Amino acid sequence: MRERWYRDTTQKLLFGVCAGLAPVIGLDKAWVRLAALVALLISPLTTVVIYGVAVWLLPVKPYLEGEWQRKS
């Protein structure tokens, strides 16, 4: 079953888009954030628009009571 993409607000730097994408594509969140930074340097307007749309469309990852405390 395919994992759903959420915004992970417990491990966020801004809105949790990169932290939520990392487990879906199987990379560490640091690499996803680095790729987003490179994209921002290459094409700032496009990156900001795509990130903004993701913030607007992606739901926040649901957690059970206390589950967020076990995340590393």
Image (spheres, rainbow, N blue to C red):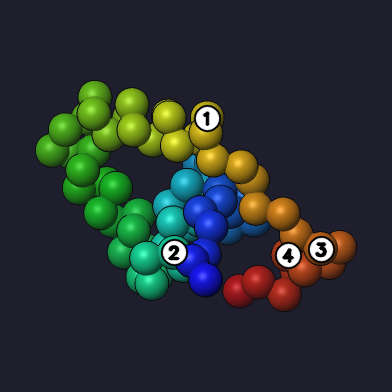
Which circle, 4 or 2, is nearer the viewer?
Answer: 2
Q: Give the SS element for disc 3.
A: loop
Q: Residue 24 carries which label?
A: 2
Amino acid at circle 2: Val
> Does the residue at mark 3 contact the one at mark 4 (Cβ under 8 Å)?
no
Residue 72 in the image: state x and y as whole percent.
61, 74
Residue 70 in the image: state x and y as whole percent.
72, 75
Residue 52 in the image: state x and y as whole percent.
42, 29
- Can residue 6 be seen in the rendering of this structure? yes
Among the 4 quarters of the image, the one containing residue 44: top left
Q: Give the SS element for disc 1.
A: helix
Mark 4 Cα-neighbour bin, 10 Å: few <14, some 14–19, many ≥20: some
> Does the residue at mark 3 contact the one at mark 1 (Cβ under 8 Å)?
no
Which circle, 3 or 4, is nearer the viewer?
Answer: 3
Instruction: Report which residue position mark 3 lands on.
Output: 64
Q: Which comes before the other along the chain, label 1 or label 4?
A: 1
Mark 3 Cα-neighbour bin, 10 Å: few <14, some 14–19, many ≥20: few
Amino acid at circle 4: Trp
- Residue farthest toward the left in the current orientation of the protein: 42
Which circle, 1 or 4, is nearer the viewer?
Answer: 1
Q: Residue 68 carries which label?
A: 4
Q: Residue 56 carries which label?
A: 1
Q: Which comes before the other along the chain, label 3 or label 2?
A: 2
Amino acid at circle 3: Leu
Residue at x 25%, y 54% (from the top left corner): 35
